[in-house]
Amino acid sequence: MQLDNFSSRETALLTRALAFVRPAELDPALTGAVRIVKTDNFADECDQVARYYAPLGLETPASRPVFDSGRNPGHRILLNNAAISGLSFLHTLVGDLVHLANLCRYSADHGNVYRFTQEQAIAHAWYEFLLWSRFQAMRIATRAHALVSWHEVNGEQPPADGCYRFALVDLASPGLTACLEQLRRAEDLAAWRAGLWDLLQELALYFGRLAFYQRDPRPAELDGAFPAELLAETVGLDNALALYRTLLQADSYDRWSGQWDAIRAAVLAMQEHGRHRCAAGD
């Protein structure tokens, strides 16, 4: 792993964070081959990269994973120095490394993702893959960030009983709330459908954060502000929980490849809920 513009302490912290990631979740050989650049010129460098590598839908204001589909891949991650604070870079980088590992597996099975037509993307479950990778990366990155943060406060030694405990867990998700409100205000099916993909992405991230702390799809037990009523109104609470249940079960790429149809079924059920809701409002 080549790190550009990182201090020795930041390098050590990232090494520690990766120790909390299982080899089955992130191939150590891939990690060693990725170049990570922390930059103050994030927008300009993203523009330069986009000339050769189109966005894949996994980019954020904090970082830009660059997946190289060539025979001798040169995967990169651009890290926006202005968008990180404290240990947040650990969460961002671990998540992006997981995305790159998932993309390597997916492209080996389905071909060059940059050449997909819309029909090929649907046939190869590309959109279901993106949702799953967002969830998986968030779950793993949350674990790595939380455990490194725990050790920063409590010292080098792990808990005597092997069980990490956290006094305060922030599960607030403004993006999820905004997407739900947008769907709630949708006046017709076209407007509702226009906001669904954004909601699905936010749900994948939200459920990924929850998944570090629980193994069963019971978000209300962990998050006192879980938006059950808004989910019931907009996409159907049972449909959202079905998506969460499936994502929890797909805890590796191999398991995802056997679950993508269940992810699609949950999304289609949400679409049907939206269709009935909009028809009832006419």
Image (cartoon, grey):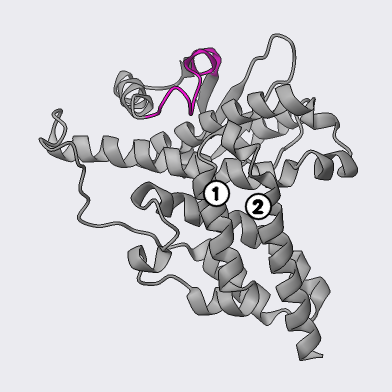
Residue extending farthest left: 160
**Magenta part of the chain:** 21-34
| Lower position in the chain sequence, tag 1 or tag 2 | 1
Residue 275: x, y in percent? Answer: 78, 76
> Residue at the spot x=48%, y=49% of the render?
208
**Does residue 60 appear anywhere in the picture?**
no
In the image, taking residue 171 as reference, residue 249 lies left or right, namely: right
Q: Residue 241, relative to residue 281: is it above or below?
A: above
Q: Is residue 240 magenta?
A: no
In the image, taking residue 180 as reference, residue 281 lies left or right, namely: right
Which three-letter amino acid code belongs to the residue tagged 2? Ile
Q: Residue 219, relative to residue 41: is it above or below?
A: below
SS category of the residue bearing label 2? helix
Identify residue for label 1.
Answer: 247
Q: Are marks 1 and 2 in contact (CB under 8 Å)?
A: yes
Residue 237: x, y in percent? Answer: 56, 72
Residue 5: x, y in percent? Answer: 44, 21
Q: Residue 201, relative to residue 241: is it above or below?
A: above
Counting other residues with Cα less than 10 Å from the Cα at mark 1, is it few (<14), some (14-19), or many (20 or more)?
Answer: many
Q: Nearer the viewer, residue 3 or 214?
A: 214
Q: Is residue 26 magenta?
A: yes
Q: Nearer the viewer, residue 52 or 5?
A: 52
Q: Report which quarter residue 168 is drawn in.
A: bottom left
**Does residue 225 appear anywhere in the picture?**
yes
> Residue at the spot x=58%, y=26% of the render?
101
